[in-house]
Image (tube, rainbow, N blue to C red):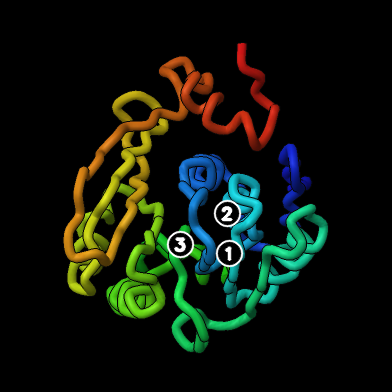
Amino acid sequence: MPVFKFKKFTIHQDSTALKVGTDAMVFGALIESVGHKHCLDIGTGTGVLSLMVTQKNPCLSVTAIEIDECAIEDATLNFKNTAFKNSFHLIKNDYFLHVFNQKFDLIISNPPFFNDSFPSPEHGRKVARNFNANFVDNFFFKSSDLISEEGRLWIILPHDQLEFWDMMASKHGFKLVKKRLIFGKPKKLIRSICVYSKKSTVLNYMEEDFCIRNMDGNYTQEYIELTSDFHDRIPIK
């Protein structure tokens, strides 16, 4: 697959198993990074989410962790070639084993989202996409220790797995602050973007819908406007 050119950076993705898709584009554009200082990107892959949130907040310091050697190759190149060079610290390690020396007020992740009943024939894609109950439990356990008191945790999930992830989040003291229901087309719910907080009280819970394409297959105006700062493949009419 050729490189994915954004307005202010380029994503090389020859080595990594999972390429940049519409999910990542929507998720990265919706993440609210302004006002945050220290971001942790769990399973950064190509680094696309790190780059998108940094474009919105150039003062953001990003720590990106990835276990896959091939993804590390791409992320290293993408971080090196961007104008945001001083914003990134890339770690090759298992998130659950790595010892961090700080807390983060913004944690983002597009986590593995297929369970073991949907194996992928390619090893790299299977590592990137599979999860089990222990993974989810450990994900929130580790994240609970790393998030600051005022921090926010953003994740994107298949909607049919939301209930399970939400249950695990609650187990570790996370409270749902915001949920965006992502529709591929009208009435076709495909993803949920969830924002969690560890604060004892959560005020003004918000749930909103977002649709990527119209019934005719063309991108919606809201998608075009959301992503217009990042790429110009779809000009606003």
Residue at point 62% right, 29% down? 228
Residue in the foreground of this view, choosing between 25 and 55: 55
Q: Amino acid at mark 1?
A: Thr
Residue at point 52% right, 31% down? 226
Q: Quadrant of the C terminus?
A: top right
| Vertical placement of residue 228 versus 2, above or below | above
For the residues marked 3 and 1, what is the alpha-carbon distance in whole angstroms? 14 Å
Q: Is residue 121 visible?
A: no
Residue 48 drawn at (x, y percent): 63, 53
Residue 29 drawn at (x, y percent): 53, 41
For the residues marked 1 and 2, what is the alpha-carbon distance in whole angstroms? 7 Å
Q: Which residue is mark 1?
A: 44
Q: Which residue is mark 3?
A: 106
Q: Amino acid at mark 3?
A: Leu
Q: Which residue is mark 2?
A: 49
Q: How many marks?
A: 3
For the residues marked 2 and 3, what is the alpha-carbon distance in whole angstroms? 12 Å
Question: Tag 2's secondary structure?
Answer: helix
Q: Earlier in the sequence, mark 2 or mark 3?
A: 2
Residue 71 drawn at (x, y percent): 67, 67
Q: Earlier in the sequence, mark 3 or mark 1?
A: 1
- In the figure, is residue 150 to the left or right of 27? left
Residue 163, by quadrant, is bottom left
- In the figure, is residue 226 to the left or right of 153? right
Residue at point 53% right, 68% down? 43
Q: Around disc 3, counting alpha carbons within 10 Å, would you say few (fewer than 14), some (14 to 19), or many (20 or more)? A: many
Q: Earlier in the sequence, mark 1 or mark 2?
A: 1
Q: Around disc 2, counting alpha carbons within 10 Å, would you say few (fewer than 14), some (14 to 19), or many (20 or more)? A: many
| Vertical placement of residue 53 versus 80, above or below | above
Question: Tag 3's secondary structure?
Answer: strand
Most distant residue in the right direction: 81
